[in-house]
Amino acid sequence: MQVSLNHEAAGGAAPDAAEARLLAPLLALMSQSQQGFALFDEHDRLQWANPVFREILGLRPDEFPSWPDLMRLGWMREKGTQVVTDDFEHWLRSAQLRRGKLPFRTIETSLMDGRWVMTTETTAPNGWMLCVISDISELGRDWRVLRQERDQARKAAFSDELTGLSNRRYLLENLRRKLGPHKASAAAVVLLDLDHFKQVNDVHGHEVGDVVLKHFAGLLQAEVGRQELAGRLGGEEFLLVWDIGDTSLLRARMDRLLERVRQSSPAYQGGVLRYTCSAGVAQALPGESEAQLIRRADAALYQAKQQGRDRWVLADATAVMPERRGSRSQRATPD
Ligand SMILES: Nc1nc2c(ncn2[C@@H]2O[C@H](COP(=O)(O)OP(=O)(O)OP(=O)(O)O)[C@@H](O)[C@H]2O)c(=O)[nH]1
């Protein structure tokens, strides 16, 4: 076992003596249980799992992978969750972006071996997560299909079909929650827009444009932690929500991200492409709504475009810039 039930690490108060006495029997019972139990840390790495969890997911006792690697292992070993897709990494990216964003959720899935399970995920504010898996194969099949269709509809309602990232609705709802009265940490939004993307479509075709959008989505997905958000607002406009209050950290992260985009080269049938993006960054002010915050980021993005693209601009905390919309057509012609 890799974890010594560190309560502070898991986001709870340290146990008193009476509670501490219960930990050993609790762990022993969880180990014997017919339900699967697993604990993931804030980086989504498995820290502890009972034998049933390992059996369901096809994990060996000495394996403590991150959740994406756990899914990849299952996919290779034909164990665990049944994933119906012809693009596993796309599926994974989409699943990962919704994982751990809510304090509690339930998911029903079928396993590769035909069993049917219900998984509950309980996530602490610091990102640690308890997963409990119950075998519900015995429940009525008709109800099961209905519930699965409901889950699929829910997923489709929150995902961007092309990139697998969160869609506008999901982003705005979660950003609103983040900025609300139960706000857990500082937040910064990054509004990103690909540069001269119309040219990519015009020169190489719409399909290559889609390849670039998916590639960019993959880069953005790698930029967010468990409690953060990455999504596509529409077209070639994307949004990141980072839990960063420190401006110098924000600057370093933005410089790194834009450099990563500059250095990347998505492959397509006709060769490799290079592209850049511009971004507007705004740090949430006390009491600011998600619409106001995004408006400030939008104004900063407009400045980044005006200043020549392939750069990012930090929004002024006080001066709210005029809206960018309507001014798009006046931007400089492609380099
Ligand atoms: N391939 C593809 N293209 C898209 C999609 N959604 C929007 N677009 C294209 O994105 C382009 C956006 O072009 P513009 O708004 O003129 O911006 P731009 O050429 O990127 O120029 P700047 O933003 O000023 O640097 C248009 O050509 C749209 O057709 C999509 O899902 N797939």
Image: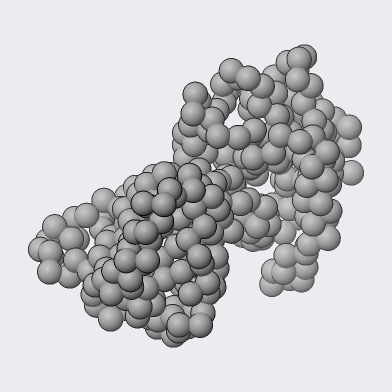
Picture quadrant of residue 102: top left
Image-quadrant location for residue 26: bottom left
Is any atom of residue 164 visible in this view? no
> Height in image: 43 above or below 250?
below
Using the image as rendered, state which of residue 11 and residue 227 is in the foreground.
11
Q: Residue at x 52, y 72 (%)?
A: 2
Locate residue 65, reporting x and y percent.
54, 73
From this view, report whether residue 188 is shown above or below residue 226. Answer: above
Please tell me in which quadrant of the rendered image residue 51 appears.
Answer: bottom left
Residue 232 horizontal side relative to residue 200, left or right: left
Name the residue rendered at 89%, 32% in the picture: 307
- Quick one: quadrant of the C terminus? top right
Instruction: Say which of 324 and 121 sits in front.
Output: 121
Q: Is residue 110 above or below residue 277?
A: below
Q: Residue sitting at 48 percent across and 74 percent down?
A: 1
Callout count: 0
Q: Percent x, y for residue 110? A: 28, 69
Left or right of 219? Residue 62 is left
Q: Is residue 282 visible?
A: yes
Please provide percent x and percent y for residue 148: 25, 58
Direction front: furthest residue: 17
> With 287 as the anchor, is 1 left or right in this view?
left
x then y, percent, for residue 94: 49, 57
* Left or right of residue 258, residue 127 in this image: left
Residue 287 drawn above or below residue 200: above
Residue at horizontal 17 percent and vertical 70 percent from the top: 137
Residue closest to the eye, 164 or 1: 1
